[in-house]
Amino acid sequence: MMLGIGALLSSCTKHQASEKTGMRYNDKYNGGFQVFRKTHPAPGPGLVPIEGGTFVLGGSADQDVVYEYNNVRRRVTVPSFYMDETEVSNINWLEYLHWLRTNFPDDQELYYNALPDTLVWRRPLSYNEPYVNNYLRHPAFQDYPVVGVTWEQANDYCVWRTDRMNENILREKGIMATWKDKNGNGKGGAATASAGNGSSSPFNTEIYLNGQLRGQGYDGKHMLTDLSPNAKATGKRPTRTARVEDGIIKQAYRLPTEAEWEYAALGLAGNTQFENIENGRVYPWDGMGVRSAKRQTRGMILANFKRGDGDNMGVGGYLNDKADITAPVRSYPPNDFGLYNMAGNVNEWTFDTYRQMSFEDIEDFNPFRGNEYANKRLADPTKGVYAKDKYGRPIYDPAKSNKKLKWSELQAMQNGGGQPGANGAPANGNNAAATTAANSPKNSGKPFRADQRGFADSVNTTLYGTTTLVNDRSKVYKGGSWNDRAFWLNPATRRFMDQDEASAEVGFRCAMDMVGAPEINPQGKPHFPVKKAKPFKAK
């Protein structure tokens, strides 16, 4: 099993020394360079580990019934990562809405923009009004997957969830002020938290790691000892905030990439031995059918989907999949990675921008389409202070280079001002419409001739958004839903929707990067030992 990373220095590092300089680590007399115990980090709440590997992306599809030709089999490698055990549920989203209402009670726009579109249930010829009014908020549906959420809203939720997770870890450990201390010891009147600029600000992971959240309401009783000779004691000992190097702060939640989602859905780890996949899969379970072959559950349907026209649940008295619309997020058996509902229930957003796939246009390691690189804006370049928006989050500007700038170039850019988005908003991919318009190709008066994949296009090989309905705002969703036929349960199938559109048939789950060694459970497997460096002894 994986171990979490503690905040305290390991006993084995008290006398550990650098193999390159011979200087001892964690010694306040020689500079105070601190080294923490190296372990495999545990995942954040709600996640399960997915050991990566090679597989054939698109390989489980045995037919193309819609004749879209939008997938080409190709072998890729997916690194190990973490993924939500279940889809994000209504109760999870209500927790998010409650936090927004509590921390920004006067910001009606923020709360309104975070509300799912419950009108996705409304149909001209269907009596779905009970779902419009009850599906999100009624306790009967609290463990059902949230729907009516756009790709943009799902990404905003990931940012919020990251900050709440890391803040809770730091407050529970006492590195930050505990929840009780922060809120006036439970006597009312929350303590004022200094944001470094004279105003209170909610916790943000990036802002905290930059040392901009200090003072009352932030500093805890068990802050880490700062061994640097330049540290100034604020009490009995010099203290500091947590750093990435300490291994306490978790990685950010995000949407899974399309390749990660498909790999996790197949769950090939359950039928693989000594690098040999014993049999392929059409669904996240073994076999070619959609019914259980086990003795106690024989004949039961393994996912929530639509068997045929007008058959969403079966015959009264013996319902087949036990669900008319969505089902609770832990319904049906999990796949071999321990993930629930990777087929059916709701389709799920992925991180990728949609394109018809080709052999030529693909990376074979960790494939992803949608990179828009951005840099955090500096409010004070001389001190390295990040600029923040009114919600306490860093402001991002489009990256000016694909490499590290020289110091002189960085200062010139900061002094001359970057090119932020409209009204000072970050241009970090959220302003995708402007990005699309800026990158749209022009025909330049040349005749247009395109083949099936754009290979013989005489004008531009990427005319998406100009001659098709597909553009940079088109995002991939996968998995099939309660209202889809069995074909869409195949992990290789893929569809797209605009990033600001929502559906009663689309939800999402989050993923997280895994850092360190990719092997999840090395016990009982052959391996070459990793040897430690010999200690240096001066003669």
Image: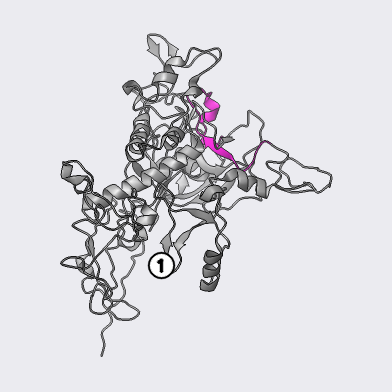
Start-end of magenta stretch: 469-493
**Residue drawn where x is 23% and y is 45% of the image:** 190
Q: In this orientation, does residue 525 appear?
A: yes
Q: Nearer the viewer, residue 195 or 4?
A: 195
What residue would you read off at disc 1?
383
* Image location (x, y in percent) of residue 490: 52, 32
Above or below 381: residue 248: above
Above or below 3: residue 343: above
Extreme-bottom residue of the structure: 539
**Residue drawn where x is 31% and y is 71% of the image:** 532
* Image location (x, y in percent) of residue 333: 37, 30
* Image location (x, y in percent) of residue 454: 73, 44
Q: Is residue 233 left or right of residue 300?
A: left
**Viewport quadrant of the C terminus:** bottom left
Q: Give the amino acid type for the residue marked by disc 1 in the picture.
A: Lys
Q: Is residue 357 left or right of residue 335?
A: right
Above or below 263: residue 22: below
Q: Residues within 10 Å of mark 1 (few under 14, many from 20)?
A: few
The quarter holding residue 98 reads top left
Tag 1 secondary structure = loop
Above or below 128: residue 468: below
**Residue drawn where x is 48% and y is 12% of the image:** 127
State whether the magenta stretch is mostly helix, strand or loop.
Answer: loop
**Residue drawn where x is 42% and y is 15% of the image:** 130
